[in-house]
Image (cartoon, helix red, strand yellow):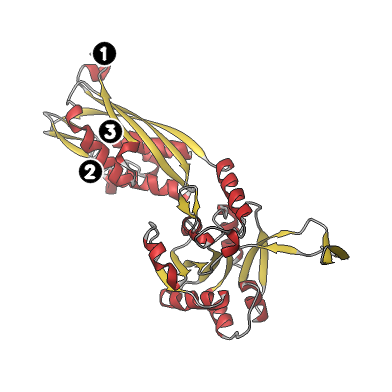
């Protein structure tokens, strides 16, 4: 089941203040749009963004790499239609249409929309209206509006792709949102539980609130990994992704990279997802002699699927030999490349056990690693 994210970011958003449209303003070190795209890309197979033609240069200054970039129209309806038409070549079964200015959509809201599309043609998150509602004129209250059955709409609004594409193609009048387009075309739309944090940035106060939510919602996790491999016949060892000449090799089912194994297990530990052996069983012959970067890349990707990223790594190699110092820089660079981290967020160091124990007797190498994961 292929799901596409269509993120609409072609508006000018001047009510938010600032020199740039709200979706291009900074929020905790990234653009508002970047946060929105990251949040949706964790749950979707294809990502398309709709931007204003004047914002192409702004997009080039970001690290965003969507599958599709399309220029929007004069109205939101026209922008959504342009995005849907661009997605036709990918033929997704479902599409989740999301505001580029909703950077804090929780994972559970996106998943709820996806789940509801299994039984409905459309689904969207919303929150019941709980405050009293008045009508007014000028600065006077003119009446009270019954709030029963009223909801505050949010995005992403999800649909069966062919159905919403046809609904937009056959419409020539403005709509409040894609739910109205769908309902006017005869599609039933299920309501799923929204979230108070899923705010749309419209005014300067919204931007400040989003920053506060991000600070309070930061998820920080710590994991430890420990691994041991004994020496056997050979002329080199693999340590933290670097081939080091030695008069012995390390023995293991894979390439026995003891440092990388410890780092990988630290990530799994922080996620509460067991260890390498659970994900890549040594009883499975396909992993015989496997390069350990396969395991580490899997752990990093799994963290991303949980809305987390690696913040820093501290790896200690415990051995009498070979000497680690001459290779530390290369080891940091190798780990940085695999995990997509700056090298200055990675520490690789070594110590001996003062001739005590199996490492002190030169029978093998041990490694201890600590990893911090933070909200992506």
Name the front one of labels 2 and 1.
Answer: 1
The image shows residue 241 at horizontal and vertical percentages of: 24, 40
Q: Residue at x 48, y 77 (%)?
A: 82
- Residue that numbered label 3 is attached to: 258
In the image, 7: left or right of 267? right
Q: Nearer the viewer, mark 2 or mark 3?
A: 3
Count of labels shown?
A: 3
Task: Report, in whole angstroms, how far the alpha carbon at label 2 lies from the one at label 3.
Answer: 13 Å
Q: Secondary structure at mark 2?
A: loop
Q: Is residue 156 visible?
A: no
Viewer-side residue, 232 vs 267: 267
| Residue shown at the point (40%, 42%) measured from the top left | 310
Label 3 CA crowd tier, 10 Å (few <14, some 14–19, many 20+)? many
Q: CA distance from mark 1 to mark 3?
A: 19 Å
Secondary structure type for disc 3: helix
x, y percentage for residue 292?
28, 42
Is 241 placed left or right of 344 in the picture? left
Q: Give the residue at x 54% y 56%.
A: 103
Which badge, 1 or 3, is on the more N-terminal residue? 3
- Which of marks 1 and 2 precedes in the sequence? 2
Question: Which residue, given by chain and number where applicable, does mark 2 sit on?
Answer: 289
Mark 1 crowdedness (10 Å alpha carbons): few <14, some 14-19, many ≥20: few
- Which residue in the protein does label 1 denote? 356
Residue 352, relative to residue 57: is it above or below? above
Q: Which mark is residue 234?
A: none
Instruction: Confirm whether residue 11 shows in the render.
Output: yes
């Amino acid at each position: 089941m292929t799901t596409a994210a269509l993120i609409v970011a072609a508006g000018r958003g001047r009510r938010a203040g600032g020199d740039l449209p709200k979706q291009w303003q900074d929020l905790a070190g990234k653009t508002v749009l970047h946060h929105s795209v990251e949040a949706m890309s964790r749950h979707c197979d294809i990502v398309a963004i709709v931007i204003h033609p004047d914002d192409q240069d702004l997009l080039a200054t970001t690290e965003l790499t969507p599958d599709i970039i399309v220029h929007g129209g004069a109205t939101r309806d026209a922008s959504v239609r342009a995005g849907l038409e661009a997605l036709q070549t990918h033929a997704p079964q479902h599409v989740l249409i999301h505001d580029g200015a909703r950077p804090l959509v929780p994972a559970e809201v996106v998943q709820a929309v996806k789940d509801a599309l299994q039984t409905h043609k459309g689904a969207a998150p919303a929150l019941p209206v709980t405050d009293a509602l008045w009508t007014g004129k000028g600065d006077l209250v003119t009446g009270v509006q019954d709030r029963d059955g009223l909801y505050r709409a949010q995005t992403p609004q999800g649909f069966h792709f062919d159905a919403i594409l046809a609904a937009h193609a056959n419409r020539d009048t403005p709509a409040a949102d894609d739910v109205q387009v769908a309902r006017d075309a005869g599609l039933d739309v299920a309501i799923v539980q929204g979230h108070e944090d899923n705010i749309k940035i419209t005014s300067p106060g919204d931007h400040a609130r989003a920053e506060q939510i991000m600070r309070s919602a930061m998820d920080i996790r710590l994991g430890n990994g420990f691994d041991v491999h004994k020496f056997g016949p050979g002329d080199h060892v693999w340590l933290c992704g670097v081939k080091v000449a030695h008069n012995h090799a390390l023995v293991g089912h894979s390439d026995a990279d003891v440092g990388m194994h410890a780092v990988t297990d630290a990530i799994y530990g922080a996620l509460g997802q067991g260890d390498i052996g659970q994900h890549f069983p040594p009883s499975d012959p396909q992993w015989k002699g496997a390069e350990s970067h396969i395991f580490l890349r899997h752990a990093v990707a799994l963290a991303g699927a949980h809305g987390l990223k690696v913040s820093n790594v501290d790896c200690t190699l415990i051995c009498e030999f070979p000497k680690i110092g001459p290779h530390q820089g290369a080891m940091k660079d190798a780990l940085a490349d695999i995990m997509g981290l700056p090298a200055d967020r990675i520490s690789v160091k070594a110590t001996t056990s003062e001739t005590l124990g199996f490492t002190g007797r030169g029978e093998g190498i041990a490694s201890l690693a600590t990893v911090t994961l933070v909200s992506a």
